[in-house]
Amino acid sequence: MPARPSRICMVLVGLGATAAWGFQAGQAVAPLASGTHESGVKVELLEVKRDSPTVVTVRWRYRNETGEVKQLTKQRTGSIDAYRLSLNSYLLDEVKRIKYPVSRDTDREPVASRNGSANEYITIRPKSVIEVWAKYIVPESTATVTVAIEGVSPFSSISIAH
């Protein structure tokens, strides 16, 4: 019998393609907070969760409810462009006055979702959603943070879930 591509493989490829265009699974998650990006797109903070004593994962999504393509990033300078939605985000401990940037791996790449390609602006198609995540190194003693995402007003007094 000749070999055929498995349906699982085709589904995974399909999911990858839809993710690249801004259609994501899990759109039913209720946001912790929301705001409006400077492009007019809604930004919804989905989760701020401690994964270990010092690692916090933050998830958010961009929701384009308009009938137009919207540009979310202002720069395109190389391989870092895929990380632009999270690159300049940070967590702020207002009590201690400490800013925690996106963590980096041993190759100095952000530990965050890739939502685009090198040398390209990140855009969102009409009536679609892009989900983003990033990891931050935050001391265990920090329980509440302000989440700062480029292009949207900060989300203040967000508790870190366990």
Image: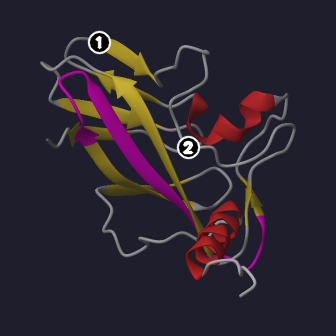
Residue ID at (67%, 68%): 13
Residue that badge 2 annotates: 113
Residue 137, quarter of the rendered image: top left
Instruction: Say above or below: 145 vs 18.
Output: above
- Residue flagged by tag 1: what amino acid is it? Arg
Q: Which mark is residue 97?
A: 1
Residue ID at (61%, 62%): 41
Of helix, strand and loop, which one carries label 1? loop
Q: Is residue 21 left or right of residue 25?
A: right
Q: How many marks?
A: 2
Question: Which one is in front in this view, the residue at disc 1 or the one at disc 2?
Answer: 2
Residue 21, given in percent of the width and then of the height, sits at 71, 66
Q: Is residue 52 magenta?
A: yes
Q: Is residue 118 magenta?
A: no
Specify the quadrant that holds the C terminus.
Answer: top left
Residue extending furthest bottom? 1
Residue 117, given in percent of the width and then of the height, sits at 78, 44
Residue 154, given in percent of the width and then of the height, sits at 42, 39
**Mark 1 or mark 2: whose residue is earlier in sequence:** 1
Q: Which mark is residue 6?
A: none
Of helix, strand and loop, which one carries label 2? loop
- Residue flagged by tag 2: what amino acid is it? Ser
Q: Is residue 43 left or right of residue 139?
A: right
Q: Assess whether mark 2 and mark 1 are in contact (beta carbons under 8 angstroms).
A: no
Looking at the rendering, the stretch of residues picked out in magenta corresponds to 49-69
Residue 18, given in percent of the width and then of the height, sits at 66, 71
Of the pair 154 and 135, the residue shown nearer to us: 135
Classify 10 Å Cα crowding around label 2: few (below 14), some (14-19), many (20 and above). Answer: some
Of the pair 13 and 38, the residue shown nearer to us: 13
Residue ID at (22%, 11%): 96
